[in-house]
Amino acid sequence: MKLFLHVWRQKDRTDPGRMETYNAEDISPDMSFLEMLDEVNEKLIQEGNEPIAFDHDCREGICGTCSLVINGMAHGPERGTTVCQLHMRKFQDGERIVIEPWRAKAFPVIRDLIVDRSSLDRIIQAGGFVSVNTGGAHDGNALPVPKPNAETAMDAAACIGCGACAAACKNASAMLFVAAKVSHLAHLPQGQPERSQRVKKMVEQHDQEGFGHCSNQYECEAACPKEISVKFITQLNRDYLRACVSAKD
């Protein structure tokens, strides 16, 4: 395959950035998208040029660091996959592919296709955890969890924190991320004591980071590589309203 890549290049946060065009030749349809970029970078290095900076880690669809907007779609055209799981057979020979970083105020560009997603970490630090006293671990069966609750909690816990929801949303909202993290613990007995406090702190931190409000158009669910349902945003809204009313009483 031969492809024509239009790639966003940006030296640092202060650089205005620009699009540059590269040819990707002799690309196997069985390569992943990141392997294709590896091939392009090998050629750039051999020619004495600066390689394209992009983020990656596990390359198994688990870590969520391969954050790219491909042809205007977060993680590319294949639903339910990360960029590292996207194969070149999804593209046509001779196709032009536009590659950009996440576009959100809360995700400033570090270099080229790499963005700073530490804003998501700060949302977790605000309340996405269960406070426990030190000591030995409790037996796993000491707190029975109803099967529907356990399954719903597991569905929410599938979120890998990649930020595709914010990149896809026209308001750059990360509400699907916050909702998944809040709902995960809200469906477990261990998460009940801090439930009200957790949702208020995480939503407040979300807003402080510069993320926008939910657009209610479900782009987040469509772009999510783990297909997290927007039903968790409904759960988040209920919990947040309840917490605010309780605080006034």
Image: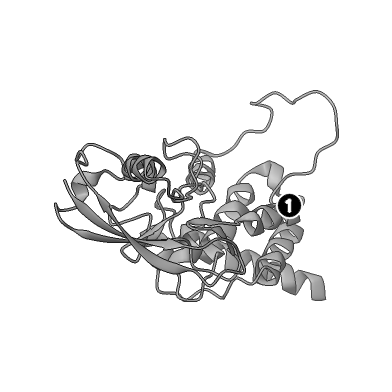
Front in this rendered view, residue 62 or 134: 62
Looking at the image, which residue sits at the far front? 48
Displayed quadrant of residue 8: bottom left
Residue 171 vs 36, above or below: the answer is below
Q: Residue sitting at 32 percent across and 45 percent down?
A: 33
Residue 191 vs 7, above or below: the answer is above
How many numbered marks have been drawn onto this rendered protein structure?
1
Q: Residue sitting at 59 percent across and 62 percent down?
A: 12
Front in this rendered view, residue 199 or 77: 77
Looking at the image, which residue sits at the far left? 93
Residue 57, given in percent of the width and then of the height, sits at 50, 38
Q: Residue sitting at 64 percent across and 64 percent down?
A: 239
Front in this rendered view, residue 181 or 118: 118
Q: How is the image coloured?
A: one colour
Looking at the image, which residue sits at the far right? 134
Q: Amino acid at mark 1?
A: Gln
Residue 132 vs 126, above or below: the answer is above
Q: Is residue 249 visible?
A: no
The quarter of the picture where the C terminus appears is bottom right
The quarter of the picture where the N terminus appears is top left
Q: Is residue 36 left or right of residue 179?
A: left
Residue 128, given in percent of the width and then of the height, sits at 69, 51
Q: Is residue 43 visible?
A: yes
Residue 238, given in percent of the width and then of the height, sits at 60, 67
Look at the numbered disc 1 and give the secondary structure of its residue.
helix
Front in this rendered view, residue 24 or 217: 24
Q: Residue sitting at 54 percent across and 45 percent down?
A: 157
Q: Is residue 133 left or right of residue 49?
A: right
Residue 244 vs 112, above or below: the answer is below
Q: Write down the residue under mark 1.
A: 125
Residue 56, given in percent of the width and then of the height, sits at 48, 42
Q: Residues within 10 Å of mark 1 (few under 14, many from 20)?
A: few
